[in-house]
Image (cartoon, rainbow, N blue to C red):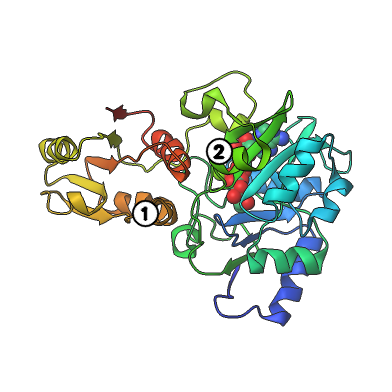
C-alpha cells in the first residue's frame, strides 16, 4: 500500500499508476467533496467484492457508482422521466446521488441485487481527474470500516485500511464532511433516502415537490428503500448521547448536570466552559459542523470517555443531514425538546 500526497498537485506519473491499478482490479482510496471513498472498477465484480471485504460491509448494502460527467450516465443506467433529468441537470456534478434503473453492465454485487444503481458525479478535482483520465466508472462507498464514522481525513483512516488497498490518495480534509444526498424518484416525487449538503429546501426550489423518507430517523430492519439505513453507522466506540434542547439556558444546564471529568463534550462555544474531560468545538455554522463532525467523533474516542455528549442542531437545511448522522452515531440515545 502506498500513500500519495496530492494535497497541492496531482502527480501525473502517480495518476498513471493509480489508473493502471484500477484497470487491473485494485482498490484506491480517494477524496471527494463529501468524504473519502474506497473505489474499484464498477464493472469488475471481483474488484467490487474486494471493497465489501476491505470494509467488512454487508453484501445487501449497495454501492454508489461515480462517473466523470452526466453524458455518461446512460451508459450505466436509464433516465426514465423528466424529474430524474431535472435533478441531474440541477445538482450534478456535486454532493448528490440519484438512484436510477440500472443497465446490465453494472454487476449485481454493486447494486446488492437491486434493479437500481446509485449514480454520483463528484465535483472534487482529484476524483474528477481520476474518473476522466481512466474512463472507468468507479464503485465507491465511504472509506471507513463498516459502522465507523466516514473518513474525512487520511490520518483518521489509514490504519483501518493498512494493506487492504493499493493506494491512498491524500487530498487533505474533505470540504463538506458528510456524504452525498441520496435521492430516488418514487411515484413522480423526489424522495430523500439520505439527507446531505443538497437539502430538501434546495430540491423543493428546483423541482417544486420533495419528500423525505420516513426511515431517516428510525431504527429499521426488514426491507427499506435504502439498505444503508438498517445498519449501525457513524458510531464511536464509546457511548454517545445526542442532546438537542432549543432553550439556550436549559441546554447549558443539561450539559452541566450531565458531564463530569469522564465526559467528552462535542458542541458549540456556549458549552466550552463546562467542566468535563475534554471539550471539542465543532463550529459555529452548519457548514462548519458538517465539515468537522466525523473527525471529532473519532477524536472523542481517543480520550476513551465514559460518555460522549453531543450538542444537536435544528433539523432544517443542512441540519437535517447532521442530525441524521448524529442520531445514528449515538445509536438512538437521543433527547430533543
Ligand atoms: O458522498 C458519498 O455518497 C460517498 C462518496 C464516497 O461518494 N459515498 C458513500 O457511499 O457515502 P456509501 O456506500 O457509504 O453510502 C451509500 C448509501 C447507502 O446508504 C446505500 O444503502 C445507498 O447509498 N444506496 C446505494 N445504492 C442504492 C440503491 N440502488 N438504492 C437505494 N439506496 C442505495
Ligand atoms: Mg458509508
* Vertical arrangement, residue 226 with respect to residue 125, above or below: above
> Which residue is at 57% across, 59% downward?
33
Residue 48 showing in the rendered view: no
Residue 237 point in image, percent of width and height: 36, 42
Taking depth in this image into account, of 227 and 272 the one nearest to the observer is: 272
> Which residue is at 72% across, 69% downward?
129
* Left or right relative to 306: residue 211: right
| Residue pointed to by mark 1 | 285
* Vertical arrangement, residue 239 with respect to residue 273, above or below: above
Q: Say which quadrant the C terminus sits in.
A: top left
Residue 158 point in image, percent of width and height: 50, 61
**Residue 12 bears which disc, if any?**
none
Residue 244 showing in the rendered view: yes
* Vertical arrangement, residue 295 with respect to residue 213, above or below: below
Q: Quadrant of ligand 1?
A: top right
| Sequence-first disc among 1 and 2 | 2
> Which residue is at 10% across, 36% downward?
257
Residue 87 point in image, percent of width and height: 71, 43
Residue 229 point in image, percent of width and height: 55, 30
Crowding at dot 1, Cα within 10 Å, few <14 / some 14-19 / many 20+, comes out as: few
Instruction: Give the spatial CA distance, label 1 vs label 2.
Output: 18 Å
* Left or right relative to 77: residue 236: left
Crowding at dot 2, Cα within 10 Å, few <14 / some 14-19 / many 20+, comes out as: many
- Write down the quadrant of residue 67 in the picture: bottom right
For label 2, the SS is: helix
- Write down the quadrant of residue 329 in the picture: top left
Cβ atoms at labels 1 and 2 below 8 Å apart: no
Q: Say which quadrant the N terminus sits in.
A: bottom right
Q: Residue furthest top?
A: 222
| Residue pointed to by mark 2 | 200
For label 1, the SS is: loop
Amino acid at each position: 500500500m502506498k500513500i500519495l500526497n496530492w494535497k497541492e498537485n496531482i502527480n501525473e506519473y502517480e495518476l498513471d499508476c493509480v489508473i493502471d491499478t484500477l484497470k487491473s482490479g485494485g482498490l484506491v482510496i480517494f477524496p471527494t467533496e463529501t468524504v473519502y471513498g474506497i473505489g474499484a472498477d464498477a464493472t469488475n465484480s471481483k474488484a467490487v467484492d474486494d471493497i465489501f471485504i476491505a470494509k467488512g460491509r454487508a453484501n445487501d448494502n449497495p454501492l454508489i457508482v461515480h462517473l466523470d460527467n452526466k453524458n455518461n450516465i446512460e451508459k450505466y443506467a436509464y433516465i426514465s422521466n423528466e424529474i430524474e433529468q431535472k435533478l441531474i441537470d440541477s445538482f450534478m456534478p456535486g454532493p448528490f446521488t440519484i438512484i436510477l434503473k440500472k443497465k446490465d453492465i453494472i454487476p449485481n454485487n454493486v447494486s446488492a441485487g437491486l434493479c437500481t444503481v446509485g449514480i454520483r458525479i463528484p465535483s472534487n478535482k482529484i476524483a474528477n481527474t481520476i474518473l476522466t483520465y481512466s474512463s472507468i466508472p468507479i464503485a465507491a462507498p465511504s472509506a471507513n470500516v463498516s459502522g465507523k464514522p466516514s473518513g474525512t481525513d487520511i490520518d483518521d483512516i489509514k490504519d483501518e485500511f493498512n494493506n487492504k488497498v493499493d493506494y491512498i490518495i491524500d487530498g487533505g480534509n474533505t470540504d463538506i464532511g458528510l456524504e452525498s444526498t441520496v435521492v430516488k424518484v418514487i411515484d413522480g416525487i423526489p424522495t430523500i433516502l439520505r439527507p446531505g449538503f443538497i437539502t430538501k429546501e434546495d430540491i423543493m426550489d428546483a423541482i417544486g415537490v420533495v419528500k423525505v423518507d420516513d426511515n431517516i430517523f428510525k431504527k429499521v430492519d426488514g426491507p427499506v428503500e435504502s439498505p444503508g439505513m438498517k445498519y449501525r453507522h457513524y458510531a464511536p466506540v464509546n457511548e454517545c448521547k445526542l442532546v438537542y434542547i432549543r432553550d439556550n439556558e436549559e441546554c447549558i444546564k443539561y450539559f452541566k448536570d450531565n458531564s463530569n471529568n469522564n465526559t467528552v463534550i462535542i458542541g458549540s462555544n456556549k458549552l466550552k466552559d463546562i467542566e468535563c474531560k475534554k471539550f471539542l468545538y465543532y463550529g459555529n455554522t452548519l457548514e462548519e459542523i458538517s465539515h468537522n463532525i466525523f473527525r471529532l467523533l473519532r477524536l472523542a474516542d481517543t480520550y476513551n470517555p465514559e460518555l460522549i455528549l453531543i450538542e444537536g442542531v435544528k433539523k432544517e437545511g443542512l441540519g437535517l443531514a447532521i442530525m441524521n448522522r448524529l442520531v445514528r452515531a449515538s445509536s438512538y440515545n437521543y433527547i430533543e425538546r
